[in-house]
């Protein structure tokens, strides 16, 4: 089994926090993927400084706009030189 020391006092911590703990069955690695996907789904809704305090989901769905020579100027564009 791959339970490390981080699970050593799970019963005590669960009791203090009033939460339930769940573990994958031994030799059932397909169960672990569901747990990791749930954690990742929650992680994608955490705002990040590097994304201007947007969540990864918000940043992903914001339209990209790159200005180049063929792009018509916008109100926020610097004047052409």
Image (spheres, rainbow, N blue to C red):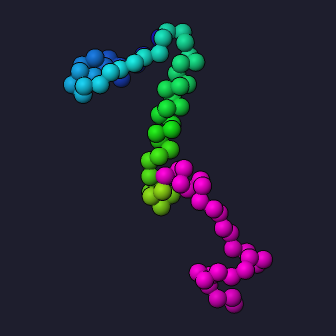
- Is-magenta flag for residue 8? no
Q: Which range is magenta?
A: 55-81
Q: Between residue 60 and residue 48, name the one nearer to us.
A: 60
Closer to the camera in the image, 20 or 27: 20
In the orientation shown, which residue stands out farthest toward the right?
A: 70
Compared with 43, 5 (above or below) is: above
Judge whether residue 65 is colored magenta.
yes
Q: Residue at x 54, y 50 (%)?
A: 57
Q: Quadrant of the C terminus?
A: bottom right
Residue 49 percent location from the top left of the image: 44, 57
Which residue is depicted at the point 35% across and 20% down?
21
Residue sitting farthest toward the left: 16
What residue lies at 76% left-to-right and 78% top-to-bottom? 69
Q: Is residue 32 above or below residue 50?
A: above
Q: Is residue 19 left or right of residue 53?
A: left
Q: Position of residue 38 (x, y in %)?
A: 49, 32
Measured as percent of width and height from the top left, residue 71 is found at 74, 76
Residue 5, horizontal then vertical, whole percent: 36, 19
Which residue is painted at 51% across and 29% down in the image? 36
Prevailing secondary structure class for the magenta stretch in the rendered image:
loop
Q: How many marks?
A: 0
> Can residue 47 be seen in the rendering of this structure?
yes
Residue 13 showing in the rendered view: no
Q: In the displayed structure, does residue 47 sit left or right of residue 66?
A: left
Asked if residue 6 is positioned above or below residue 66 in the image, the reply reads above
Q: Quadrant of residue 76?
A: bottom right
């Amino acid at each position: 089994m791959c339970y490390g020391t981080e699970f050593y006092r799970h019963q005590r911590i669960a009791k203090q926090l009033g939460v339930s703990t769940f573990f994958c069955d031994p030799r059932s690695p397909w169960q672990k993927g569901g747990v990791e996907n749930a954690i990742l789904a929650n992680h994608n809704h955490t705002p990040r400084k590097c994304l201007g305090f947007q969540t990864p989901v918000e940043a992903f769905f914001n339209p990209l706009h790159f200005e180049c020579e063929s792009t018509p100027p916008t109100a926020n564009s610097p004047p052409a030189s």
